[in-house]
Amino acid sequence: MTFSICVREEYEDDDGNDQTRFGVAVTTRLPAVGTLCPFASENGAVATQSLVNVELGRKGVEYLDDGLAVEDALQSLLNADEGAPQRQLHGVDAEGTFAFSGEECKGWYGHVERDDFTVAGNLLTGESVVEATADAYEESRGSDAPLAERLVDALEAGHAEGGDKREELHVQSAALLVETTEDREMEPYYDDLRVDATETPIADLRETFELAEEGFEMAVERYEEAYEDDEMEAADDSDDGDAAE
């Protein structure tokens, strides 16, 4: 099921505290990839694909939340999975990375592991798809742009190299998910996005991100003080019925 990226980034929050964020993004020539492949929590990110076993993603993140290292967590799940030769599974946690591509995945398939992130894909036009995705993300590290935006950039780079080779399938999808150890007053709306059915998944995911970012900025301007004071009800009342979500 096409290609995905899982990343870990350490950063400093506005109060000077060290934090870690995890992100995962994926695109494919099938609908609703966001319901099947990307999983993340404040402890790591996992992508499950090829002949998808959703439980590998769900349980993988659960194991990370229980304190298992990503290599131990994902390898143990594969060891118990009779369909492992047809799976791709990769991810990151606070300290390491893991990537697996079963020998029965459909070509081109493969993966790369680099410092703090992994990329994997199958049914691709070639190896350059995962390499371009990895290069684009790596070049973006250290940028002030939100991780969600940079994940879209990484997918775009892989898509430009050819992406999923199944050109006869015109219905496509894309998704991204970002989680962090930081306890934020307002969670950015753009950190959990899906485009479920379209012919232009990356362009639509980017437009969705841009609108979500704009909406978040508007909400911060209007409601941030109320969030901080835990007075959303009072803020809503003062807006003559306007609702904040």
Image (cartoon, rainbow, N blue to C red):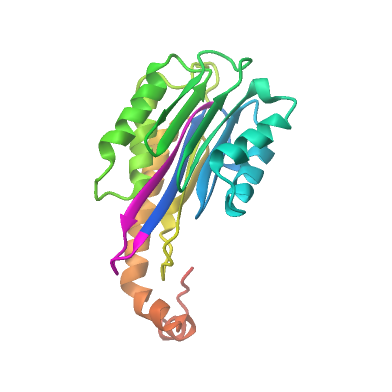
Image coordinates for residue 137, horizontal then vertical, percent = 33, 35
Does 207 sit above or below residue 103? below
Image coordinates for residue 166, horizontal then vertical, percent = 53, 17
Q: Which residues are magenta?
A: 1-18
Identify the image quadrant of residue 14.
bottom left
Image side of residue 15 versus residue 94, left or right: left
**Predominant secondary structure in magenta?**
strand
Does 15 sit above or below residue 162? below
Identify the image quadrant of residue 207.
top left
Image coordinates for residue 214, horizontal then vertical, percent = 33, 57
Image side of residue 243 versus residue 206, left or right: right
Q: In the image, is residue 6 part of the stretch drawn in magenta?
A: yes
Does 20 sit above or below residue 117? below
> Which residue is nearer to you in this view: 132 or 31?
132
> Which residue is nearer to you in this view: 25 or 200?
25
Q: Quadrant of the N terminus?
A: top right
Image coordinates for residue 190, horizontal then vertical, percent = 41, 53
> Which residue is nearer to you in this view: 166 or 48?
48
How many badges with numbers are in the image? 0
At 43% from the left and 67% from the top, the residue drawn is: 183
At 37% from the left and 17% from the top, the residue drawn is: 128
Does 41 sit above or below residue 108? below
At 63% from the left and 50% from the top, the residue drawn is: 62
